[in-house]
């Protein structure tokens, strides 16, 4: 019985788990933000490429 009470009072591992969960949450948020930014950048480059192709065709 003493072992079980001591086990529940020990909080050393809880702190490590909390830090791990925080790190995982930050990683998920960063991946989501980068994914959205990547799609936006791809769209911007596609528009710029199309405009440059049009300008090049008119110049030739």
Image (spheres, rainbow, N blue to C red):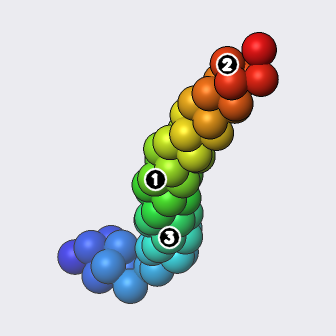
In this view, the residue farthest toward the left is: 1
Q: Secondary structure at mark 1?
A: helix
> Of circles 1 and 2, which is in front?
2
N-terminal of the pair, mark 3 or mark 2, is 3
In-front residue for pair 45/20: 45
- Residue that appears at 27% across and 73% down: 4
**Residue that badge 1 annotates:** 36
In-front residue for pair 8/57: 57
Q: Position of residue 51 (x, y in %)?
A: 62, 36
Q: Is residue 2 left or right of residue 55?
A: left
N-terminal of the pair, mark 1 or mark 2, is 1
> Of circles 3 and 2, which is in front?
2
Q: Quadrant of the N terminus?
A: bottom left
- Residue 19 vs 54, above or below: the answer is below
**Residue that badge 2 annotates:** 57
In-front residue for pair 15/8: 15
């Amino acid at each position: 019985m003493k072992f079980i009470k001591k086990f529940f009072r020990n909080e050393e591992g809880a702190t490590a788990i909390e830090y791990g969960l925080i790190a995982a949450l930050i990683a998920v948020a960063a991946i989501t933000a980068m994914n959205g930014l990547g799609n936006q950048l791809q769209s911007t480059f596609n528009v710029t490429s199309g405009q440059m192709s049009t300008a090049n065709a008119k110049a030739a």
